[in-house]
Image (cartoon, rainbow, N blue to C red):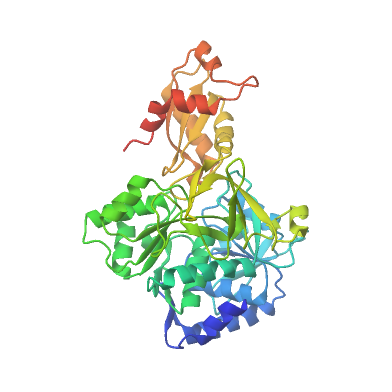
Amino acid sequence: MKDTLHRALAAAPAKALAFDDGSRRLNYGELRSVVASECSWLRMRDLQRCGLLAENGCGWAIADLALLRLRAPNLPLPTFFTPSQMIHAVDDAGMDHVLTDRATEFCAAHRQFTLVAVSPYSGLALLQRTGRVPSRELPKDVAKITYTSGSTGAPKGVALSAGSLLAVAESLAAAVRTAGVQRHLCLLPLSTLLENLTAIYVPLLLGATSLLPPSSRTGVRYGQFDPRELISTVATSQAHSVVLVPELLRALIAGSNASEGFPSLRFVAVGGAAVSQSLLAAADALGLPVFEGYGLSECASVVCLNTHGARRPGSVGRPLPHVRLRVDEVGEIHVAGAVMSGYIGDDELTRSDSKSREIATGDIGEIDADGYVYVRGRRRNRFITSFGRNITPEWVESELLSEPQLKLAMVVGEAQPFAAALLWPRADVHDEHEIAAAVARANARLPDYAQVRRWACAPDSPAELHQLLTSNGRLRREVVLTRYARQLDSLFAP
């Protein structure tokens, strides 16, 4: 385990509460013991690389910390991945074991894995690969591999060292320490890199308590989000800090309007997608201590963050202490400091020196005279929903256009709670029910976060449609966005 985290865990008072998931509570003395035992238990099973697929809770935290101490590459698997995405990640990264609370489900999807034991410490089942382990070279210093929600069906794996992860965690701990944060509420999946840092590593560095309720108690479930459960969880937790994506912040603001607010909150970090200024203004009006940030997996999560002592509305804050950030001549943001060791399968990048590497983010931005960073957009077509999920529209559009009823499709959803589509049916298709069935079939092949929740047909004649296409038949996206702005906006109307 990285020295700073090990020292913090060892120095905390034994009886101070470390983790509480509603069913299990661990003080720091118990946590030290159970992590050491889990580590020894895993070492006896000749584990080399391990996936981690489980609901939020103490078991997840114990397994994560034990794998970090073992220096075994850990692949947190998002519970919202489709079976095909899950299999891709496990095989792409060459995992030989998986720790999980859903052994039957995983083994049914990936038949090369079988149950070998259940940990008496984390409570998770250990699965072992029975077939040949895919040969995949990893960077020597890799501690964690994170596959994001996936802007395509087969997302890339980002390899991160313990040094990069802890550099970000230490910067975040310093940022919230001045706010007196001693009780954090975990709402996002722990498989999300940001929450992995803020709900596991940052509280341990602070000697604080982290509340790790399962999603069944928080209302934060992909495809089944329940704002009332979220509001109740935050109100009763007495938490000092939470991390939110914009859609959760919107629900919290609505709950604050309908109640006495959330007086215990001292630091509400929001990121993962663009945050509207009207949403931030509404939070300010209610006295919610909301601080916008910015980051990406390739930079071990958070890069910039507004704080109590340095906050500028409209910006994503100043770079954290470990970060070196610049904007190039075309306005693209580049980041150095705690960055990835490489992408899985990208041997050239894996061999290069991560300490001196600079990541081109693909985001357009600027830095003001006081060092605050402003993110203005993306160089590519990818968009991020208000739940923080990355989606490349071409991926969803390809699923839609695999249906014979549809000729063209334009998918949008930047900073919105779901993806929506403008559709051009084929000339012989006039039945709306037939189109709806086509959309439903495409959605069945997509994970919840990428499914098209609303759609409309564009009323174009053949001559008008020709004006929207490039010479090779692709939609001119900017032309469509301008021409159909009203129709596209209506897809997200309440």
Q: Position of residue 400 (x, y in %)?
A: 54, 32
Q: How many numbered callouts? A: 0
Which image quarter holds the C terminus? top left
Q: x and y percent of residue 201 in the render?
A: 52, 72
Towards the viewer: 340 or 94: 340
Closer to us: 352 or 223:
352
What residue lies at 40% left-to-right and 54% top-to-bottom?
A: 312
- Judge whether residue 278 can be spotted in this image: yes
Compared across the picture, whether 31 is left or right of 162 comes to: left
Q: Position of residue 305 (x, y in %)?
A: 47, 59
* Residue at the farthest top position: 463
Does 311 sit above or below residue 116? above
* Residue occupying the point 49% across, 55% down: 371
Q: Residue at x 42, y 88 (%)?
A: 15
Residue 192 seen in the current view: no
The answer to whether residue 294 is above or below residue 384 is below
Residue 208 in the figure: left or right of residue 144:
left
**Above or below, comparing residue 251 to residue 260 in the picture:** above
Query: Foreground residue, 168 or 194?
Result: 168
Q: Residue at x 71, y 68 (%)?
A: 141
Q: Quadrant of residue 393?
A: top right
**In the image, residue 271 above or below residue 445:** below
- Please identify the quadrant where the N terminus is shown: bottom right
Image location (x, y in percent) of residue 376: 49, 43
